[in-house]
Amino acid sequence: MSEDLDRLSARWNYPTSVRFGVGRIAELARACTGLGMSRPLLVTDPGLAALPMVGDAVAANESAGLPTAVFSDVKGNPVKRNVDDGLAVLRDGGHDGVIAFGGGSALDAGKTIALMAGQTGSLWDYADVDGKWKRIDAGAMAPVVAVPTTSGTGSEVGRAAVIIDEATHTKRILYHPRMMPGTVIADPALVTGLPPPITAATGMDALAHCLEAYSAPQYHPMADGIALEGMRLVKEWLPVAVLDGADLTARAHMMAAATMGATAFQKGLGAIHALSHPVGAVYDTHHGLTNAVFMPYVLAFNRDAIAGRMERLARYLNLPDPSFQGVMDWVLALRAELDIPHTARELGVEEDRLDELSEMAARDPTGVDNPVPVGAAELKRIYEAAFEGRVG
């Protein structure tokens, strides 16, 4: 009995204020002023910076008496240099807040720039390892309004960001409870222009977050419930959104699923992300696509530990086979329907680097919450299976 009670000890947090719905981008200026901003810096990526949605947002802020500058030198997998350059723009321009506007890269970069706004050290002084995040002066952080333009990472409701250390080619995590954006504007209309391959990859990222959170062994029934419903939304609506990107109902449900995935994964992630992060850092692959490739191989590795949970998931999703195998069959069929590569080889992963990648994956903090303990040897076995296309 005492062991059970010990297991039922946990610490839970839930996300921030979310303004959700078509047309809510019109509330951007009010969201900024509500957080005390008078001169925000909009952080985005180069592709979005050239689109009307960013220009329209800046113009609307200007007409509301809120001068807004744009910083867009952010890579698809953001690096420390992007954060340093954006921080210089923030400080030199006297900006008092950040609008993180875009997909996961812009959201992570914007949140990290805001975190660093008033810190006195260098970025890696505050990386989430050995309790370094406790060095962060929370009062020196700038407020953030997050505006997602993809439906995958859920970074708009996250308390962390992933930035690449160019010196070591590793993805490093920056974390602080106050990194959670103060307000989120989740407008499905902003996602309608995403092409089908990016819609598919980001949607699979949302699925990976929900699936790993649901599989993680910690006690968090609220996160489990959110993850389950997030996966149902992905099942029902991701294929629709890929087929017809202008379907606002599908876009809205997928935007909700992405936010739900990031809400749920405060419970934990697992080996999908531990394997994906090194590959993304070394080969600059799309994070959601990389998660999608490794997903079935990690499911197979974890089978004995998660079979009961997968049966419950299969029943909730109304799969024809209410079992672990039913979930596996659904994941494989969804990947095929969305043209997701089946093997790590197709991502460009090189067989002679699997040892190196395995060591990197073993150091990634997301692997700690995998249902089956993983070290370099176990992670290499999964890499090998994914490289060869062996599921099960």
Image (spheres, grey):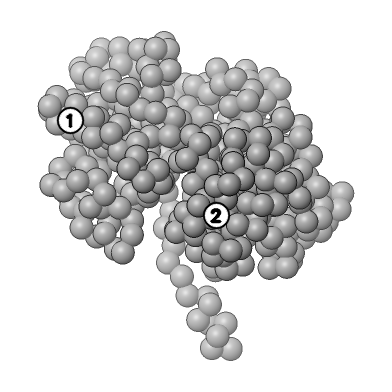
Vertical relation: 195 (above or below) 218: above
Vertical relation: 251 (above or below) 214: above
The residue at the point 76 percent across, 32 percent down is 337
Q: Residue furthest bottom?
A: 1
The residue at the point 33 percent across, 59 percent down is 129
Q: Would you identify the image quadrant in which residue 331 lies? A: top right
Q: Which residue is mark 1?
A: 88
On the rendered image, what quadrant is the N terminus found in? Answer: bottom right
Q: The residue tagged with tag 1: helix, strand or loop?
A: helix
Count of all numbered marks drawn on residues in the image: 2
Q: Would you identify the image quadrant in which residue 96 lies? A: top left
Q: Residue 277, image x and y in percent? A: 49, 46
Q: Residue 315, image x and y in percent? A: 78, 55
Q: Would you identify the image quadrant in which residue 205 lies? A: top right
Q: Amino acid at mark 1?
A: Ala
Q: Which residue is mark 2?
A: 355
Nearer to me, 102 or 38? 102
Vertical relation: 296 (above or below) 8: above
Instruction: Inspect this view and state whether residue 318 appears.
Output: no
Give the crowd class for mark 1: few <14, some 14-19, many >=20 residues within 10 Å: few
Q: The residue tagged with tag 2: helix, strand or loop?
A: helix
The residue at the point 49 percent across, 46 percent down is 278
The residue at the point 43 percent across, 17 percent down is 47
On the rendered image, what quadrant is the C terminus found in? Answer: bottom right
Tell me: 251 left or right of 368. Answer: right
Nearer to me, 356 or 239? 356
